Image (cartoon, grey):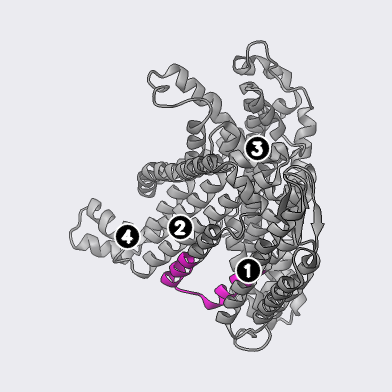
Amino acid sequence: MPVSYGTLLRAGLALLLLALVLWPQGFAPVFAPFAPEGGPVIYTRASLLSLSLGHLGLVAVATLASTVVAVLLAILVTRPAGAAFRPLSRTLTNVGQTFPPVAVLALAVPVLGFGTGPTLVALFLYGLLPIFENAMTALSTLPPRTMEAARGIGLNRWQQLWQVELPLAAPVMLAGIRLSAVIGLGTATIGSTVAARTLGEVIIAGLLTSNTAFVLQGGLIVGLFAVLIYDALVQLERRLTPGRPRPA
Amino acid sequence: MSLRSGLSPPGLLFAVLGLGAMALPFATLSANRIVAGQGLALWQVAGPWATAAALAAMALALGLGLRGGWPWARLLGSLLGLGALLGLLGHAAPRLLAEAGEFARVSPAAGAWCLLLVFMMLMADALSVLRPGPWLRLGLLAGALALLAALFASGLLADLSVFQEYRARIEGFQRAAARHVALALGSLLAAGLIGFPLGILCQRRASLRAVAIPVLSFLQTIPSLAMFGIMIPLLSWVAASVPGARELGIAGIGFAPAFLALLLYSLLPVVANTVAGLDAAPRAAVEAARGMGMTPAQRLRSVELPLALPVILAGLRIVLVQNIGLAVIAGLIGGGGFGTFVFQGLNQTATDLILLGALPTVALALVAAILMDIMVDLTRHSPGEAR
């Protein structure tokens, strides 16, 4: 059965990830052939656990902040009072998403300096776009009959929003959050070039000293985190979408 | 609704933001290209007459933006505002430099960037209300590019520090531009050559689709730096063990790993949109083609693919814009492109060098997106003429 294969694969990858982060010395024989002659095989300048926590924390804070702001903005724009902003916001999200995340990160440095700050701001700003786009689409394409029924049973506007609109829009919004989280994980990796403490540090150290063992080690850990988080959010979306095919 | 007449709420927002931006430092004067400079307010950078003229023009531009009913006037207003902004910068830079040291640099500061953003948003808002058709959009894009080229050729902005940085490395810039475009377009082409047949096969065989699409989505999930990094040992191994690979220019660092990483990222949008486009071809049209006695190959070529073209092109748009952005990472693994400047700039904390890499990347991505959108619209309007 494909389901059990999937579960097995997930568990296996999660275990591999845990081992890579918590017990890096154990992989020395695996990475040794890639290290330069006599060079270090395993990254020891910082603990992989603290880098992982820093990386995930950064993405979590940024994605959470983007979610709150983007959903609020989407609610405002889909109310009658905010309708005049709708064409503009659609254009801005379209144009904004053509901006490369790396460029946003690089442009944040002249304004905010080096460190975790600019990375956080870049992740937050860029993360707004997919969430806002999905939330706006979901909130403006709700089935009119459901909305009529909600009005018919006497819900006020606030109740309509809270009890009908937001729950119905949740799966599509979650797809936007997943997109933002995945982009955030990738951008945070590059954040180590602007001195944010993330797992990208391991890869960059490998690139600077031509130590492929570091590159592989960092790349594997970041890649596994991204794949597992993406997969977990897809599963969550499926749970939240009863009896409907998963929106793309 | 205030779209037809009266006050435009976005226009009011732009006016408030614009007036606020005028209070921020307008330009930065620094002793050389590395040190932090000193911020100068809008009214400190030029003589009274030039400042008054620029301020009046920008105020008029924001005022034109306030009226809801005239999108063309608002578009004109945004151009007027941009003109005044750039004019003031261009006028101020040589004056400020004349009074400063030999290595001094003048660059736009937060206020100028915010004003640029406000006028661009005004332009975007006017355009989103005007909803120009594809040909008009093409004309507007050509006009904007021509204006930009004329602006650069005129030398008005030549004393701004980004342009000084550019003049110091014209050759390197041209090489980086060529390499960046080669990476983005080359990987797009390769993704098309592999992705179209794969997409067509996936649409025919559910079993292949069930494997290919999830695998390709997982590939897309892998952070770019990790992907580019993992390509290095892979390709060093290929170069070392496959005879003839090294002669073809395949090596662990440089163009090859960057190209391969971009190609892997490109496959999902191409394959998924080919499948979606073919799936969406109306059944009636396919049935009619079958009724006319067309072979499966003929049906694919003359019915299904033309009908799927807008969706396939939308996939190519995603790939192109994404690749232009991701090609920046190539700068970290010696693959060239604008990323070289971005990461050099980050290393040296040289803001102008970062801008020299980031601004052309953003512009390239924007132009590519607009062009591809126009193509998608054109094929959608006249599927019969599409090639």
- Quarter of the image where the C terminus of chain A is located: bottom right
Check disc 3 and report the residue beneath it: B344
Query: Which chain does tag 1 point to?
Result: B
Disc on the earlier residue, 3 or 1: 1
CA–CA distance in space, label 1 to label 2: 31 Å
Is the residue marked by circle 3 packed among few (<14), some (14-19), or many (20+) residues within 10 Å?
Answer: some
Above or below for B346 versus B43? above
Q: Is residue B195 visible?
A: yes
Whether labels 1 and 2 share one chain: yes
Whether labels 3 and 4 share one chain: yes
Check disc 1 and report the residue beneath it: B82
Q: Secondary structure at mark 1?
A: helix
Give the amino acid at mark 3.
Answer: Gln
Q: Picture coordinates of residue B304 (x, y %)?
A: 31, 58
Check disc 2 and report the residue beneath it: B314
Give the amino acid at mark 4.
Answer: Pro
- Give the camera-side residue of B134 and B54: B54
Whether labels 3 and 1 share one chain: yes
Query: Which chain does tag 4 point to?
Result: B
CA–CA distance in space, label 3 to label 2: 34 Å
Q: Picture coordinates of residue B41 (x, y %)?
A: 80, 63
